[in-house]
Amino acid sequence: MNYRILGKTNLSVSEIGFGGEWLERHPEEHSIELIHYAGEKGINIIDCWMADPKSRDIIGKAIHENREKWIIQGHIGSTWQDGQYKRTRDMQYVKPAFEDLLERLQTDYVDLGMIHYVDALEDWNSLQTNGFLDYVKSLKKSGKIHHIGLSTHNPAIGKKAAESGFVEMILFSINPAFDMLPANEDINAMFADTFEESLSGTDPERADFYRSCVVNNVGLTVMKPFAGGRLFNEKASPFGIALSPVQLIHYALTRPAVGSVMCGYDEKWQIDAAVAYESADEKDKDYATVLAKAPLHSCKGQCTYCGHCKPCPANLDIAMISKYYDLAVMQDKVPQTIREHYLSLAHTASECLHCGACESRCPFEVKVSERMQKAAELFSK
């Protein structure tokens, strides 16, 4: 298992995470065994947005003997009322729900205290004035949470969180389909039966959100990497083609600022399928060739950081240079954080030989040599 530093939290998280929302589907013993198995495979981060007692109890019983090895994303504002889940900002429910979370997880803290499910601007504004954020900050001060996080499906909210100064990491929905959709306060829009055939490339607002995360050193963990399983089925996929778990995990992990991809599991073989990413070869990881041939999708001319351009005779990491270039070019002035990331590369764009070998391999027909020249000029200013 490979591990990544999750932004300014400095936590080392496994590239493959454990999304816990399916735990309650199974007998307690089965789900506890799944968590144990995931831990044996090197997974060390688990998300608990669920408010139901069964899911929380399962996680608590599964990790109590080695609590220090697990990084918990515990959600604040996810409550259990009248036998069902309800998201709320009402403090009479929020506080006891979080205390219940600690008790059932058999711990006195969670590593990442997640402001739960903020997709609307009105919600973002109100939680800062109704006592909710004050409560979250008090939890951090008391040590009951170690870092403040936030979960959202809306890049507009994600950007505000990344630039807020108090949010340290974000749980965000990432997959090739969602990346093409414009910001929306209604998550159901992401699961429409059909999308416009004109969808092409990463939506600019999502790209700007990724840039903000890099600039502000706000790490991302990923939810919905498989779009609820739709992307495994060519008939359900908006692209008209099927992608594998390894390809979709690779896509998510090549987005800026991403630390871990939170996958849901019913059985051990699904854990194996996700962890197989760590030993997969480049052919198995290759999402780009598949997407480039998809009948309902086009990224022509746009770098997706897939790595097909390798190897470079000048040893350039073209994908990373392109990533930093795309993040930097959105601004009138190159953000210092991105400049430092670029300059830390072993080889920079100015060393490009303009041989064109990379362009012959690019499935999206990106003019790589031209991009390297533009990147060299941009970062030399």
Image (cartoon, rainbow, N blue to C red):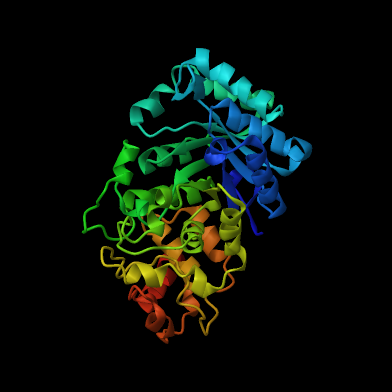
Q: Position of residue 133 (x, y in %)?
A: 51, 23
Q: Quadrant of the C terminus?
A: bottom left
Residue reaching furthest to the right: 65
User: Left or right: where does residue 126 sit relative to residue 105?
Assistant: left
Give the side of residue 248 with respect to residue 66, left or right.
Answer: left
Front residue of 140 and 379: 140
Residue located 45% across and 22% down the image: 88
Image: 150 above or below 296? above
As drawn, which residue projects farthest toward the top? 92
In depth, the one of 313 and 265 nearer the eye is: 265
Q: Residue at x 57, y 69 (%)?
A: 280
The quadrant where residue 360 appears = bottom left
Would you identify the image quadrant in which residue 368 lies? Answer: bottom left
> Residue at position x 32%, y 39% from top?
188
In the figure, residue 111 lies in which quadrant? Answer: top right
Give coordinates of residue 117: x percent, y percent.
44, 33
Please state which of residues 58 and 167 is positioned toward the viewer in this rendering. Answer: 58
Q: Dividing the image into 4 quarters, which one contains the N terminus?
A: bottom right
Asked if residue 160 shows in the view, the reply is yes
Q: Is residue 15 visible?
A: no
Question: In the image, residue 214 lies at what x, y percent?
Answer: 49, 51
Residue furthest to the front in view is: 27
> Is 185 placed above or below 244 here?
above
